[in-house]
């Protein structure tokens, strides 16, 4: 054929000796193709010429429309061939005419032609690249589809021509700068699919669209796209090549080096397979399956020849690739990549690279060019690129020879060892050494290839047949460097030659035979059967090019789409994204660049089916359809979850599906918890439900190599690494009995389900045994709560449930104030069951209403009353995750209540893959998820939004709510005000839930809830909207509630009248309810129950629903029912009606069931009962080890035994697992929402710590248990000896205390500390309990939680009071004297400190009587205790007692006699003891107390003389800190403040003013500025004195500079201190008095304060305490309205009101001052 260059010149050239077939342009190609026809043109220019001529005719038709009539269209144009018989046109052009036509076309439309050819070039190149990921037999089947379709179309055309109904084709043209739009006949439209780069196909990531969309177009529109499964049978020899060493190598090399290494090694193997004509079917990790099949079209035509080819190939592989040593440096990556790629680049060079180069250089200007200036034409460029690879170049340089072209004469590349070690002299890093090895197995026989999947999402080619089992057995028998063949293969091989060894006996025994070991072969073919070499892989690039010569664009597009379905989505996505770009890099460079080391979730799933072929076509077709169903179910869920299917394969492990998360396009926040594990559950469940197939699965999450694996012309995308091997191992039947098994990383990143620990396994790539776990799926009503199970059929309580639903419905539909529903019921009446059922019913109802609902649930435990904010410690973490941006909230509200487009906020993501998958990514990728990824950061966000002080994050978040904050500790000396903390938590709750239409705050067992939690519940109720507080409690009449009495009274009063408070009182079941319950439990109809049976059961249970369920369960377990003669169901023991089922009480029934258990299980339940109603598994396990002295080597076995015991208890209904945010769940490894941020850079942070609590086998599987009912725990404890219980409490306390020491974060955890205290106290260890109570109580008092501290002190004292309850000895402070007699000095000292601390806490709360009793008890015990006289006893411990009693006395709690004998007595004793102690700190305090007593008695002179003694011993610089530590403030320095009043009483004003000056200039500057309370006490009398001497403004400046400013600097404006409520009114009084005739800036604020009656509500303890320093606070407060009433700018009505207020408050202050110092009285 004439060359393009010659035609462009207009010259002529002789046609080639073998011209191509004719090509008809403008209509469909007319090749006569059948299965045996291989007449595709080898001349690559033919299709280009066809395309050019077609475009010429079309474009010239547009240009020359005036020269041709639309009614007489030009006939098609045809090229003349040298084969006369192939001509089929009316108009023929000679060579000159063709050259002129092409020249004209290039001149007029060169740019359009170039673009069209470029698109075709890119499409062909893309197909070639994609085909390298697919077996040759798959490509061949797709090409056969096109061939068959062509024949069918040709036959249809012939039939139409014979009928004479062929119409001329009238084509209209429309040309643009970028594309041709062609309107063709309907037949041509069949192939006119969407282009691969269509806009629709470019949307989203590969995980978000189907592969069909990536390919562009609907494959169903093509006639040769068939439905699946498709199957074909063949006779084949199968070779399995297993490579070892990659796993170890992956841990030694960087990703580039590893990629180079494995692909270089694979290239050596693939070269051999290709050389012998094998087809690589699958890459199974680090192994490959190769096939030689019998075919009449190939050189290998018999099964014997196939076996010989496979055996010879395997022998060459082990000879070439065994013991392949690698020596390199782990730090070399890029340099090494270039070395390896340089040896491969030429062989991967694409013909289209040259075409692009020529296109880019083509000159498409209209100006003609001379022959010498012309560049090579388009077709010349393409032809030259092809020819250059077939022969030496024009420059005489030989290109590298392809292995497939030259067989055994191929040019050998340098070994990998040599290439890597070349860098060694330039790198000082330590070298890594590794050895790669290979072994092979050969099988032969009948096989079936099945195409499974669909035509839109994904396809896989699966091979079945006995040869797969044969190669598995042969490979298992082989060692490194060996080739073994199955008996069947040996039988065929012996027909082609001889085999050395005892192969006959092996055939008889069914054993494989060795054929080769490294370089030695043991089989010898006959001369006439020499193996064929140089064949090449079935679908290498040049072989495919011959097929594409006459493919039109629609055929190419279809072929590309279909191949894409077989290729991994990551590869398809990359190919699609780069399809429109010119690629200058080679395929090898692209593959190396795409290799990565990523954290990948890899899951192996093995469906348990019989996959053996039977030979029965009907049965085998059922198998093929079953495999297709498995594939489609898996891909259906994978597409919705946006995961990736890696492979569907049948190998030695059976049928295996592999899918991943974490690759490009399938990486998401919360990926493991919200996608991977739920999807695994869903696939397993779907296969079981839809197909009845059981499944075993193994999953891991760890770094793995992700990239292309294989050689240049055949490779696949794979995931390799130790974790992948582990996942496969976990799936295998040896470790897996039809369950899901995961590694520790998956477990640590999934908090919504439970994991059962299993024995560790050894795995390739791991030095130590690997912990594994079984995830246990839980129902949605369990997730995220400590709540019970809602029942499908709930007996009784219908009216109560309807009432709760009515209230909730009204609130959800209308934005109204919150309501309170209180359920009161005795134990056993079904209170908890009702709350669970009502809560779930309400949740379902509101969800059905399309309203947003948040359900937060909590069950209080018996220890919660001691833990401040115990309720919110648990639920606050869940609430923080409900935070929505205001923008998000507004968007949600705009949906008018619709839940579409967002996840339901009332529960975690369900484990079913449904429509929520589409919404997951929206929430997971939100700003909030990325920025606020932990509870601590969310809490800080809330603090900022609510303008909370900085110290809240530390004090409230970490210490009170248990959030592990990363913020720096606050430097404040005082915590935030307790009222501010309460308000903040309530506001935060409201803020976190404001986007919901209904918030259901369901709280059970609130009789155990602490006081602070009650206060927050009260604040939420009073200030929120649409919060339904649903509380359950035992009757308050018998179970004290820690709720505020005033609030409780208002609930039953005003709130009840308003309809905001409702109460439900549960009673016993009626006989009708009991009858219905019997019918439900025993699954019988109501009318089948015998009357005596009903009465017996009802009487035994006492009508208590919970106990009734126990009775019925016992009857059912023991099969105690029988059909009576009357046809009704009764008891077998019905004749013994008095026995009531043989048990006198339900407690006896429970004990009966407990006694039936194994003794080891009973021991575990004893431990559980001592731990409490709810406990951690890990706490139980550690205590179990402590009880039985378990050594380290036996820890795992012990843990498994304990878990087994708890499993038994669960099955018996004694215990249940609960989901709760425990102290170990949260922030230990980060919030699940932040997992990718932590793990994508490495998994070091999630590995289990090698020491401490974290080293326990159950640490990563810690869970919580609780007794299903408190009666179980009570029954167990009732039969245990007190000594045994105390021993267990001590062991538990020891374990928990060890945690506090080992774990830094636990040291500030009040909940854990209180938990440890409880067990020490119940163990009877007074020393430990008292020490902890003092430590924890001190922290609580600092936080202002005095009431909680008092409860702890009471627990310690009550434990002592319970000792020897029948002892008649006298009691001192409630403790028997016989007990005090046994005390040593240590016991006595701790006891006195406990009483003193209790007295202080009572004083802080204004509980004067409690403080008096505590101090007096301490003094009585101190006076009695025999050990108090010991020399080693520290008498200074008594000093706080005297000081405390004096404070109580000043509070007016102790009645004063006129003689003040009590007061004088304690002062005398204090001074005497302090003098003997010789400590100026305590002696100064005693003298100061004595001075106050003298002044109280009116002895002011003696008091002033006493002050002189104080001056002689008081050194503020050295004693101030010690005095404040011992007594809370500088009581000695404050004596000077008191002396101001003493001088006033004596009329010594000058002396009083001089003392004021001394205090201001000498004492205050040397005092601690952070102790604002002490500074105020020092300056209070000074400020009042200055005010009374017309120095009000100076006093105001002094107060601001010395008190207010330092407090705000060191504590913050939001902080609190004892006297802070006095500051604002005093500053107002000083301002108005000093500016009486001047304008005041803040007069309006003053008026608002004065006219508010609540401003004068001051604690009586402050009134009494400060009234002993100077004027009573209320007297100062009363001056505010007084001075305001004098202001002219205040109107008359307000003046009247202000005067009335001032008089009222002054009268109260005068009454209060009667118990204070004389100066307070005179001031009032």
Image: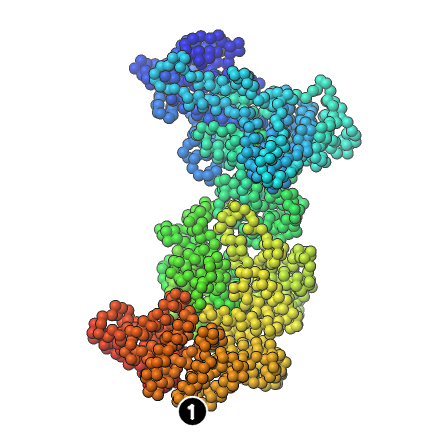
Label 1 neighbourhood size at 10 Å, few (<14), some (14-19), many (20+)?
few
Q: How is the image coloured?
A: rainbow
Q: Nearer the viewer, residue 1220 or 1205?
A: 1220
Number of numbered callouts drawn:
1
Q: Vertically, is 578 above or below 1193?
A: above
**Residue 1204 rendering spot, x and y as whole percentages:** 65, 57
Q: Is residue 171 left or right of residue 21?
A: left
Place of residue 585 in the rendered image (x, y in percent of width and height, measured from the top left): 49, 29
Which quadrant of the view contains residue 1499? bottom left
The relative height of residue 233 versus residue 804 in the rendered view (above or below) is above
1055 vs 1465: above or below: above
- Rendered residue at 58%/63% (across/down): 1301
Closest to the observer: 1320 or 1009?
Answer: 1320
Residue at 66 percent of width and 72 percent of height: 1283
Q: Which residue is mark 1?
A: 1458
Residue 424 in sight: yes
Instruction: Give coordinates of residue 180: x percent, y percent.
Output: 38, 24
Residue in front for this viewpoint, 1271 or 487: 487
- Which element carries disc 1, helix, strand or loop? loop
Observer-nearest of 1143 and 1119? 1143
Residue in the image at 50% along x and 84% along y? 1470
Residue at 52% in and 64% down: 1308
Q: Position of residue 679 (x, y in %)?
A: 53, 46
Residue furthest to the front in view is: 1512
- Relative placement, left or right, of 1273 versus 852 is right
> Is any atom of residue 567 visible in this view?
no
User: On the rendered image, what quadrant is the C terminus found in?
Assistant: bottom left
């Amino acid at each position: 054929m004439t060359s393009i260059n010659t035609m462009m010149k207009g010259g002529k050239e002789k046609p080639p000796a073998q011209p191509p077939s004719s090509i008809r342009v403008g209509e469909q190609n007319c090749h006569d193709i059948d299965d045996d026809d291989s007449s595709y043109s080898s001349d690559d220019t033919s299709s280009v010429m066809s395309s050019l001529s077609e475009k010429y005719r079309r474009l010239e038709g547009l240009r020359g429309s005036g020269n041709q009539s639309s009614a007489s269209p030009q006939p098609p144009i045809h090229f003349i061939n040298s084969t006369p018989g192939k001509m089929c046109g009316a108009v023929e052009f000679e060579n000159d005419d063709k050259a002129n036509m092409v020249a004209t076309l290039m001149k007029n439309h060169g740019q359009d032609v170039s673009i069209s050819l470029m698109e075709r070039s890119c499409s062909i190149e893309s197909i070639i690249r994609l085909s390298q990921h697919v077996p040759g037999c798959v490509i061949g089947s797709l090409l056969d589809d096109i061939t068959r379709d062509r024949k069918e179309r040709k036959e249809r055309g012939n039939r139409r021509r014979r009928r004479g109904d062929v119409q001329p084709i009238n084509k209209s043209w429309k040309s643009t700068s970028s594309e041709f739009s062609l309107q063709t006949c309907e037949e041509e439209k069949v192939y006119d699919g969407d282009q691969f780069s269509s806009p629709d196909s470019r949307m989203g990531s590969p995980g978000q669209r189907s592969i069909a969309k990536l390919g562009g177009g609907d494959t169903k529109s093509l006639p040769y796209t068939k439905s699946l499964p498709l199957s074909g049978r063949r006779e084949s020899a199968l070779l399995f090549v297993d490579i070892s060493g990659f796993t170890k190598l992956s841990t030694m090399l960087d990703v580039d080096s590893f990629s180079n290494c494995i692909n270089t090694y694979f290239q050596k193997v693939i070269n051999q397979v290709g050389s012998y004509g094998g087809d690589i079917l699958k890459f199974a990790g680090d192994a490959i399956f190769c096939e030689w099949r019998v075919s009449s079209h190939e050189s290998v035509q018999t099964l014997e020849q196939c076996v010989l080819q496979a055996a010879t190939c395997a022998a060459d592989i082990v000879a070439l690739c065994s013991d392949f040593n690698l020596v390199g440096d782990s730090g070399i990556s890029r340099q090494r990549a270039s070395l390896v790629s340089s040896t491969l680049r030429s062989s991967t060079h694409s013909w289209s690279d040259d075409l692009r180069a020529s296109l880019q250089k083509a000159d498409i200007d209209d100006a003609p060019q001379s022959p010498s200036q012309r560049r090579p034409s388009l077709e010349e460029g393409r032809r030259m690129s092809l020819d250059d690879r077939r022969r030496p170049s024009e420059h005489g340089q030989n290109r590298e020879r392809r292995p497939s072209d030259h067989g055994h004469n191929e040019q050998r590349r340098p070994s990998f060892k040599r290439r890597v070690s070349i860098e060694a002299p330039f790198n000082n890093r330590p070298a890594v050494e590794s050895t790669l090895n290979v072994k092979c197995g050969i099988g032969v026989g009948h096989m079936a290839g099945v195409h499974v999947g669909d035509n839109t999402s994904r396809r896989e080619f699966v091979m079945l047949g006995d040869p797969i089992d044969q190669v598995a057995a042969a490979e298992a028998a082989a060692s490194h460097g060996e080739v073994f063949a199955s008996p069947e293969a040996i039988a065929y091989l012996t027909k082609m030659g001889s085999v050395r060894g005892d192969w006959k006996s092996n055939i008889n025994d069914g054993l494989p035979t060795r054929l080769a070991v490294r370089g030695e072969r043991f089989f010898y073919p006959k001369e006439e059967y020499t193996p064929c070499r140089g064949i090449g892989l079935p679908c290498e690039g040049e072989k495919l090019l011959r097929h594409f010569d006459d493919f039109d664009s629609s055929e190419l597009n279809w072929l590309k789409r279909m191949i894409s379905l077989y290729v991994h989505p990551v590869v398809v996505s990359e190919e699609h994204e780069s399809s429109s770009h010119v690629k200058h890099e080679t395929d090898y460079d692209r593959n190396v660049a795409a290799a990565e080391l990523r954290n990948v979730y890899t899951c192996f799933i093995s469906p348990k089916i019989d996959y053996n072929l039977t030979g029965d076509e009907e049965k085998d077709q059922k198998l093929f359809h079953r495999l297709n169903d498995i594939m489609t179910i898996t891909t259906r869920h994978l597409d919705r979850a946006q995961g990736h299917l890696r492979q569907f394969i049948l190998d030695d492990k059976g049928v295996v599906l592999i899918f991943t998360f974490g690759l490009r396009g399938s990486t998401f926040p919360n990926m493991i918890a919200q996608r991977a594990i739920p999807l695994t559950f869903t696939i397993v469940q779907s296969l079981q439900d839809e197909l009845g197939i059981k499944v075993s699965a193994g999953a891991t999450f760890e770094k793995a190599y992700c990239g292309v694996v294989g050689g240049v012309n055949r490779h696949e995308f794979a995931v390799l690494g130790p974790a992948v091997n582990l996942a496969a191992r976990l799936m295998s039947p040896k470790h897996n009995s039809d369950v899901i098994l995961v590694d520790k990383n998956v477990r640590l990143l999934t908090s919504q389900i439970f994991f059962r620990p299993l024995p560790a396994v050894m795995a390739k790539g791991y030095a130590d045994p690997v912990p594994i776990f079984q995830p246990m799926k839980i129902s949605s009503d369990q997730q995220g709560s400590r709540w019970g199970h809602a029942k499908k059929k709930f007996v009784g309580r219908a009216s109560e449930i309807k009432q709760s639903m009515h209230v909730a419905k009204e609130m959800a539909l209308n934005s109204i104030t919150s309501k309170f529903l209180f359920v009161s019921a005795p134990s056993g009446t079904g209170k908890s069951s009702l709350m669970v059922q009502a809560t779930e019913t309400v949740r379902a109802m509101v969800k059905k209403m399309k309203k947003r609902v948040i359900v937060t649930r909590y069950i209080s435990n018996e220890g919660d009353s001691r833990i401040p904010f115990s309720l919110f410690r648990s639920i606050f973490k869940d609430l923080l995750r409900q935070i929505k941006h205001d923008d998000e909230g507004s968007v949600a509200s705009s949906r008018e209540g619709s839940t579409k487009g967002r996840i339901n906020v009332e529960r975690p993501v369900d484990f079913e893959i449904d429509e929520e998958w589409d919404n997951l990514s929206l929430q997971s990728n939100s700003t909030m998820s990325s920025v606020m990824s932990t509870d601590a950061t969310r809490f800080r966000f809330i603090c900022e939004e609510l303008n909370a002080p900085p110290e809240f994050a530390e004090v409230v978040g970490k210490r009170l709510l248990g959030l592990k904050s990363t913020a720096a500790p606050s430097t404040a000396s005082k915590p935030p005000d307790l009222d501010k903390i309460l308000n903040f938590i309530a506001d935060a709750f409201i803020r976190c839930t404001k986007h919901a239409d209904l918030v259901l705050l369901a709280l059970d067992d609130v009789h155990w809830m602490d006081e602070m939690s009650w206060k927050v519940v009260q604040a939420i109720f009073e200030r929120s909207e649409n919060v339904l507080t649903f509380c359950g409690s035992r009757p308050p009449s018998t179970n004290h509630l820690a709720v505020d009495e005033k609030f409780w009274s208002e609930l039953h009063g005003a709130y009840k009248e308003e309809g905001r408070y409702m109460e439900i009182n549960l009673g016993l079941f009626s006989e009708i309810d009991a009858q219905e319950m019997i019918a439900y439990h025993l699954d019988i109809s109501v009318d089948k129950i015998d009357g005596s049976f009903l009465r017996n059961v009802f009487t035994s249970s006492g009508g208590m629903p919970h106990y009734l369920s126990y009775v019925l369960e016992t009857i059912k377990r023991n099969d105690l029912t029988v059909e009576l003669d009357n046809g009704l169901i009764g008891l077998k023991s019905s004749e013994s009606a008095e026995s009531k089922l043989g048990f006198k009480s339900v407690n006896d029934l429970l004990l009966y069931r407990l006694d039936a258990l194994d003794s080891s299980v009973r021991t575990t339940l004893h431990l559980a009962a001592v731990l409490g109603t709810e406990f951690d598994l890990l706490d139980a396990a550690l205590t179990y080890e402590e009880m039985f002295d378990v050594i380290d080597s036996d820890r795992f076995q012990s843990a498994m035994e304990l878990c087994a015991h708890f499993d038994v208890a669960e099955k018996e209904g004694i215990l249940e697992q609960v989901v709760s945010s425990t102290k170990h769940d949260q922030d230990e490894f980060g919030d699940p929402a932040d997992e990718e941020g932590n793990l994508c850079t490495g998994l070091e942070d999630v590995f289990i710590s090698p020491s401490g609590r974290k080293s326990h086998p159950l640490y990563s599987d810690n869970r919580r248990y609780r007794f299903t009912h408190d009666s179980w725990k009570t029954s167990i404890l009732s039969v245990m000896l007190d000594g045994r219980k105390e021993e267990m409490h001590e062991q538990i306390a020891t374990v928990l205390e060890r945690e506090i020491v080992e774990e830094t974060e636990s040291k500030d955890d009040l909940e854990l500390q209180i938990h440890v205290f409880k067990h020490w106290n119940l163990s009877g260890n007074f020393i430990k309990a008292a020490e902890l109570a003092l430590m924890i109580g001190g922290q609580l008092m600092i936080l202002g939680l005095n009431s909680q501290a008092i409860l702890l002190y009471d627990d310690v004292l009550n434990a002592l009071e319970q000792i020897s309850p029948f002892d008649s000895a006298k009691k001192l402070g409630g403790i028997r004297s016989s007990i005090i007699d046994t005390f040593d000095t240590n016991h006595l000292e701790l006891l006195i400190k406990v009483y003193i601390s209790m007295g202080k806490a009572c004083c802080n709360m204004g509980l004067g009587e409690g403080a008096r009793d505590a101090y007096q008890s301490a003094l009585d015990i101190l006076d009695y205790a025999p050990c108090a006289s010991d020399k080693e006893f520290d008498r200074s411990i008594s000093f706080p007692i005297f000081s405390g009693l004096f404070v109580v006395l000043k509070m007016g709690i102790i009645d004063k006699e006129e003689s003040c004998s009590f007061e004088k007595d304690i002062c005398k004793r204090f001074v005497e003891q302090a003098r003997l102690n010789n400590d100026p700190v305590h002696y100064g305090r005693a003298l100061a107390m004595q001075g106050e007593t003298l002044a109280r008695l009116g002895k002011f002179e003696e008091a002033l003389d006493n002050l002189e003694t104080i001056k002689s011993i008081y050194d503020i610089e050295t004693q101030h800190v010690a005095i404040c530590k011992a007594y809370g403030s500088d009581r000695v320095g404050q004596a000077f403040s008191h002396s101001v009043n003493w001088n006033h009483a004596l009329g010594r004003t000058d002396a009083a003013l001089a003392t004021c000056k001394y205090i201001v200039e000498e004492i205050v500057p040397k005092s601690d500025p952070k102790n604002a309370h002490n500074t105020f006490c020092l300056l209070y009398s000074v400020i009042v004195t200055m005010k009374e001497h017309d120095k009000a403004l100076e006093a105001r400046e002094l107060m601001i500079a010395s008190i207010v400013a330092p407090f705000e600097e060191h504590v913050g404006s939001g902080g609190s201190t004892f006297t802070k409520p006095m500051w604002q009114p005093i500053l107002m009084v000083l301002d108005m008095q000093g500016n009486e005739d001047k304008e005041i800036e803040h007069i309006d604020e003053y008026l608002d304060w004065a006219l508010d009656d609540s401003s004068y509500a001051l604690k009586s303890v402050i009134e009494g305490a400060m009234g002993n320093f100077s004027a009573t606070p209320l007297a100062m407060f009363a001056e505010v309205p007084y001075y305001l009433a004098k202001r002219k700018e205040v109107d008359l009505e307000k003046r009247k009101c202000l005067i009335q207020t001032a008089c009222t408050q002054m009268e109260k202050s005068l009454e209060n001052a009667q118990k204070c110092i004389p100066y307070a009285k005179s001031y009032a």
